[in-house]
Image (cartoon, rainbow, N blue to C red):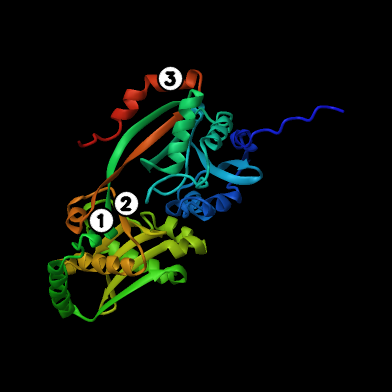
Amino acid sequence: MAAMTKPMPLDTFTRLSPALAADCVDGLAASIDAVAARAAPTHRFLRYGWFAAALQAYGGAARTLTVTREGEPAAALPIVRAGPGWLGLASVPGCYWPFRSFPVRDDAGVEVAEALLARLAREANALRLGPVYDGDPGLELLRAAARAKGWAVLDRFVADSYLLDIAALQAEGTWPRNSTLRKNRFHEKHLAGHGELDWRFVSGADWDQDAFDALAEIERRSWIAARTDGSDAKFTAEGHGGFWRAASADPAIAAMMWAAVLRVDGTPAAFSFDLNAGALKYAIANSYDPAFAKHSPGKLLYYRNLVRAVADGMTKVDWGAGDSGYKRVIGAERGPAIRDWLFVRPGLPALAGGMLRGLWRRSGHEQAN
């Protein structure tokens, strides 16, 4: 009788790597939505419709790198060509608000990123990822995999973010302050002298042409039009209006898109535009008609918006980069840094990338202590 084989210890099975497969397809892969649905709640807007909107608004021909684990998609990385063709540089398409990244399942390990980089090396010499926050799930997995596999990793500082932890401030009993609410009521009373005030919220199926046109109308009368060339406006045709209109075609993204709008005698006067992701609100844009500036319509609106956010169960607001003055007044504090990253494949490209590390870093902004 043959000797019986000893059973393998249980921990041997748990150490085995899951079956991984990496692929690259032309265009945007349908699997993007499957990955986004299992991503961290803060990243579930990174859907097929998000990237499709970016291609429609900003151009480019995409390919998608996917990694499946035991037959299920675990990561999806859309890429477009960037810079001169001879460089072999790829970048992640998307919108800079709130950041530019790609979806990974929330239970993905570094082995998923290793498989992704191995496939990426066959498609490009380098990948630009960002601007993106420190701690971004896709970023951190790629960094860990790149270190293990000999890729050069370059970063440059873009800006600090600002985070309002509403739950923490409420636990301390300091938000919103009664004095702030009294001031707001005073300003609302005097603002009403200009006409009937109409405060409303827009989300989901409410996103139609009229809703976007109202936001664009406010921007065209705001400081953005008066002091800049208008290219940074979020909702005008000259700005990024094409992106947000296209993104709203995906009902799941439209449900996350949120605007608080103030009208005075039926005329759009101020808005606050956000992306709601789980218990986190990304504050993307605020604007107002300077004709009402004396009564702080923007401030009145975003306080109403934040009170509604609390009622909806939201606990934090990510204010992103930019003017920190009013954000600190609200109670926001400095959050994760926002950086631009280059991942350069092993060999001569990585060697060249390492030599250019200082130049890439100096092309960013200086980080405050």
Residue corresponding to mark 3: 352
Report x, y in % for residue 63.
57, 41
For the residue labelled by badge 1, is the local secondary structure a helix, a strand or a loop? helix
For the residue labelled by badge 2, is the local secondary structure a helix, a strand or a loop? loop
**Are the residues flagged by discs 1 and 3 in contact, CB closer than 8 Å?**
no
Q: Quadrant of residue 167?
A: bottom left
* Amino acid residing under circle 2: Asp
Q: Residue at x 33, y 70 (%)?
A: 311
Report x, y in % for residue 325.
17, 52
**Mark 3 Cα shell of 10 Å, populated few (<14), some (14-19), many (≥20):** few
Marks 1 and 3, the one that precedes in the sequence: 1
**Which mark, by number, is residue 232?**
2
Distance, label 1 to label 3, CA atoms, is: 40 Å
Q: Residue at x 38, y 59 (%)?
A: 279
Q: Quadrant of the N terminus?
A: top right
Residue corresponding to mark 1: 224
